[in-house]
Amino acid sequence: MSEVENEETLTCGICRKTGTFTAPVSVILVFAPAMSKPYPLIPAEDYRVCGACDAIFTLINRAVEAHPTTRAAGPWSRAIVVFSDGHGVDVKAKRQGQQVALA
Ligand SMILES: [Zn+2]
């Protein structure tokens, strides 16, 4: 199996499924206990998220850690991801001690 990326067939890096991707992310509203109001993160690139697994958590974690304001606020508790087609997803942070290892 080759790992060639095809523009039309996205493959999830986590669950390996194809064809379950959302529209590109327009904005991620991040809620954290340390912030009095949600902070909007706008992805610099087109991010499409696999809808078949927990890939959206990875996306939010990476977005939060990439921005100084949200990184300084500590762990997020909730996030609302809005896609370019107007669809939105309300994501609650997992309350487990699970850490996502990023190489
Ligand atoms: Zn997936």
Image: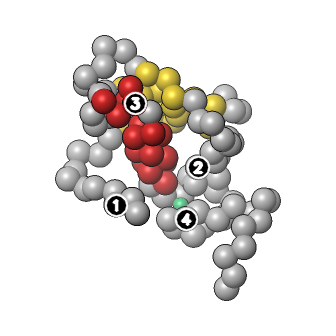
Q: Amino acid at mark 2?
A: Val
Specify the amino acid type for callout 1. Ala
Q: What is the C-alpha distance between the residues marked 4 and 2? A: 10 Å
Where residue 84 sits in the image (x, y, percent)?
69, 32
| Quadrant the C terminus occupies | bottom left
Closer to viewer: mark 1 or mark 2: 1
**Upstream in sequence: badge 1 or badge 2:** 2
Tell us which disc is closer to us: 2 or 3. 3
Q: Nearer the viewer, residue 64 or 83?
A: 64
For disc 2, the marked residue is 49
Whether ligand 1 has any atom under 8 Å from the Cβ at mark 2 is answered as: no
Please tell me in which quadrant of the rendered image residue 99 appears.
bottom left
Residue on which the image places disc 1? 101
Q: Is residue 21 above or below residue 64?
A: below
Label 4 sits on a secondary structure element that is: loop
Q: Which mark is residue 13?
A: 4
Residue 70 drawn at (x, y percent): 37, 29
Disc 3 versus disc 4: distance between alpha carbons? 26 Å
- Callout 3: helix, strand or loop? helix
Count up the numbered dots: 4
**What residue is at 50 percent from the left and 65 percent from the top?**
14
Badge 4 density bin: few <14, some 14–19, many ≥20, Cα 10 Å: few
Circle 1 sits in a helix, a strand or a loop, which is it? loop
Q: Label 3, on which residue?
A: 68
Say what secondary structure mark 2 lies in.
loop
Q: Residues within 10 Å of mark 2 (few under 14, many from 20)?
A: many
Q: Amino acid at mark 3?
A: Pro
Asked whether disc 3 touches disc 1, contact meaning CB atoms under 8 Å apart, the reply is no
Q: Amino acid at mark 4?
A: Gly
Tell me: is circle 4 under 8 Å from ligand 1. yes
